[in-house]
Image: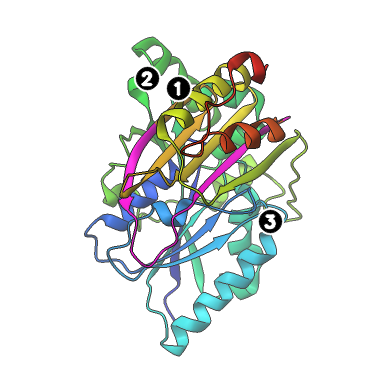
Amino acid sequence: MTELIPVTIITGFLGSGKTTLLKRILQADHGYRIAVIENEFAAESIDNALLVQDRDEQIVEMNNGCICCSVRGDLIRILGELHGKREAGTLAFDHVIIETTGLAAPGPVAQTFFAEPSVSEFYMLDAILTVIDARHAQQQLTEHKEAQEQVGFADRILLSKTDLVNKEELAALRRRLVAINCRASIQKVSFGNVPLRDILNIRGFNLNAIVELEPDFLGELGHRHGDGVQSFVYHQPQAMDLMQVENFLDAVVQVFGTQLMRYKGILNIAGTPCRAVFQGVHMLMGSELGAPWRDDETRASKMIFIGRNLPQDMLIRGLDKCVAGVSAGLSVAELA
């Protein structure tokens, strides 16, 4: 019998640090040949551009829908195509990592590896890794069923951004996580830095424990998003002014931060050879310089916004005014 290909699912709510963890795995010297399947709730993704690929990893994007519901069929198809290429000798990999969108419920994704014969014949679910944003987790667990399910299905819980909370807050969060899932080990992770022996090839998925959590796991397990979450993608072919972008987004966060669940982007900044990377969760925002633009690629800015009742028209108008050489952007008063 052919040895089954192990699959690791990386889940966690919006902005928890999933892509940072994946980037750390791909950069590490572990000897694995990894195929990556990325899912983005929005119509497009920037994560592929953020991942530094030192080897020939195969990265497949699944956009404009959630892997646990609307594009779940695509997951089955992609896994089949990857296996077909592996058998034909056109693609070499010995491990698959699936990075879900932050809005995904992991149950239907995990179920795929047991309920779909075309998948279970060749793949084995090795573990579900759930990344938890220590700064925003309490709010997310209270407001979103998906965040609770991501914790409940976890085989390993990785706590990110622990430097942004105090000891009492961290202890309270640990107690809540253990109350939801006492099976999974909990460890801190800083910028995706975690021993790979703790997360890859660990044979951590326990079907019996999951059936206790979700009795219908092997039956019909559907999922729909009904909380009004939406997304849109902003494109700008002209170079932008970094200071104006920062000032504008600071103002946006102050006024609409509770509605903005997640926002991230790659910016083409005038006079800068490197792309600028913006990421934010609610009212917490940061930026850094990314990789240099290649001579053979088109420099352009792309930002993704995910949230409730997004002020899309205002965001587009404000960002358009951040193009280099254009007059100052919108004020906070105008935003309100």
Q: Is residue 108 magenta?
A: no
Q: Quadrant of the C terminus?
A: top right
> What's the amino acid at mark 3?
Leu
Residue 135 numbered mark, or none: 1
> What's the amino acid at mark 1?
Arg
- For the residues bearing labels 1 and 2, Cβ distance under 8 angstroms: yes
As rendered, which of 16 and 129 lies closer to the eye? Answer: 16
Q: Is residue 291 magenta?
A: yes
Q: Which residues are magenta?
A: 287-309
Residue beneath the point at 66% across and 44% down: 232
Who comes first in sequence, dot 1 or dot 2? 1
Q: Main secondary structure of the magenta part?
A: strand
User: Does dot 3 land on a helix, a strand or a loop?
Assistant: loop
Question: How far is disc 3 from disc 2 in space, using C-alphas?
Answer: 39 Å
Viewer can see residue 295: yes
Q: Quadrant of residue 76?
A: bottom right
Question: How far is disc 1 from disc 2 in space, using C-alphas?
Answer: 6 Å
Judge whether 180 appears above or below 288 on screen: above
Residue located beneath label 2 in the image: 164
